[in-house]
Image (cartoon, rainbow, N blue to C red):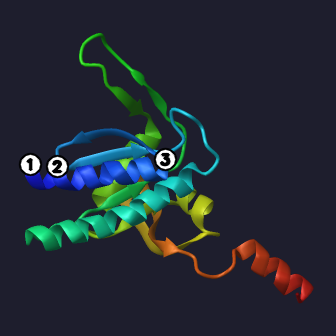
Amino acid sequence: MAVLDGLFTRWDALASRHGVEKIKTIGDAYMVAGGIPVPRQDHAEAIAEMALAMLPEVRRCAAETGLPLEARIGIATGPVVAGVIGRAKFTYDLWGDTVNTASRMESHALPGTIQVTERTYERLRDRYELRARGTIDIKGKGPTTTYVLVGRRRREPRARRDLRDRTGR
């Protein structure tokens, strides 16, 4: 419990810094979302930045505790239903295919990686380095094309390169 509390406390600080909403923890799972409850155009980028910052915190925590800690992170982009249900122990929660898909991305990811859907890849590909993981069989979805988020792209965005290639400038 103490190790998870320490790690999740670090992740809470990251969530605040990146402007994403912590939804809940379930056991050793930590769920955040971007663009809720207040919509934002860069929700996918905010989640990507959060995910990229989470892995180094896992490594630091592992080094400090001497425990072999690793994390798998899954990201999906799309609509969700959000709200509070019931009258006791109010909890803001999310539902929908996007939530289920993000969970599947996490559960099928390799340890130490951030696995994303093709829809997320399309949102991030100009600003981030992503590598094709290939098609994997996702429970409830079937064969699904996935990618691994590696980091921020260090070179100019694809649209600018394409324009330069066409104009020679």
Secondary element at tag 3 = loop
Task: Report the residue marked by disc 1.
Answer: 1
Task: Report the residue marked by disc 2.
Answer: 5
- At horizontal 42% and vertical 47% (from top left) the residue drawn is 16
Q: Quadrant of residue 58?
A: bottom left
Residue furthest to the top: 87
**Observer-nearest of 136 and 56:** 56
- Which is more N-terminal, label 2 or label 3? 2
Cβ–Cβ under 8 Å for marks 1 and 3: no
Cβ–Cβ under 8 Å for marks 2 and 1: yes
> On screen, 81 above or below 106?
above
- At horizontal 31% and vertical 25% (from top left) the residue drawn is 91
Mark 2 is surrounded, within 10 Å at the Cα level, by few (under 14), some (14 to 19) or many (20 or more) other residues, namely: few
Separation of residues labelled 3 and 2 (CA atoms)? 21 Å
**Observer-nearest of 100 and 70:** 70
- At horizontal 51% and vertical 36% (from top left) the residue drawn is 36
Q: Can you give x and y, in whole percent of width and height, for residue 45 in the image?
A: 55, 57
Report the amino acid beneath label 3.
Gly
Q: Can you give x and y, in whole percent of width and height, for residue 21 in the image?
A: 43, 41
Report the amino acid beneath label 1.
Met
Separation of residues labelled 1 and 3 (CA atoms)? 26 Å
Report the amino acid beneath label 2.
Asp
